[in-house]
Image: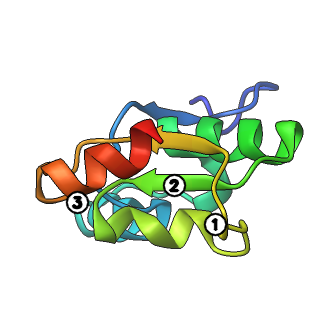
Amino acid sequence: RLRGAPVTVRFVTNTTKESKRDLLARLTGLGFDIAEHEIFTSLTAARNLLEQQQVRPLLLVDDRALPDFTGIGTDNPNAVVVGLAPEHFHYEMMNRAFR
């Protein structure tokens, strides 16, 4: 019914563990009729802010989330993006993030 109504449809999630492409594959596998541009995640919001602020992040996110940051410069970081990524939360990485 929503697709036939004069409204914009979006699927919104706060997941930071997987890219939009992975999420799309999972949702279509469950039978959802959905396009990638209809998905808005917290990673989408983070990427938008990075682009708006023109900063270079240290990405403390799960490796499966990295595709959502393709094209974002990460050399000589001056910002930190934190997601659910326990494998990246160790002394060396946290020390780097605080610096």
Residue on which the image places disc 2: 58
Q: How far apart are marks 3 and 2 (CA)?
A: 33 Å
Q: Residue at x 39, y 51 (%)?
A: 96
Residue on which the image places disc 1: 74
Residue on which the image places disc 3: 30
Q: Do the residues labelled 2 and 1 touch (CB within 8 Å)?
A: yes
Amino acid under label 2? Leu
- Residue 88 at x, y = what percent? 21, 57
Q: Distance between the residues labelled 3 and 1?
A: 34 Å
The label nearer to you, 3 versus 2, is 2
Q: Is residue 55 above or below residue 6?
A: below
Amino acid under label 3? Leu
Crowdedness of circle 3 by 10 Å Cα count: few (<14), some, many (20+)?
few
Q: How far apart are marks 2 and 1 (CA)?
A: 6 Å
Looking at the rendered structure, the secondary structure element under dot 2 is: strand
- Residue 44 at x, y = what percent? 60, 45
Q: Does residue 97 appear left or right of residue 48 in this picture?
A: left
Q: Which residue is drawn at 26% across and 69% down?
A: 29
Amino acid under label 1? Thr
Q: Residue at x 62, y 48 (%)?
A: 38
Crowdedness of circle 1 by 10 Å Cα count: few (<14), some, many (20+)?
some
Crowdedness of circle 2 by 10 Å Cα count: few (<14), some, many (20+)?
some
Q: Do the residues labelled 3 and 1 touch (CB within 8 Å)?
A: no
Looking at the rendered structure, the secondary structure element under dot 3 is: loop
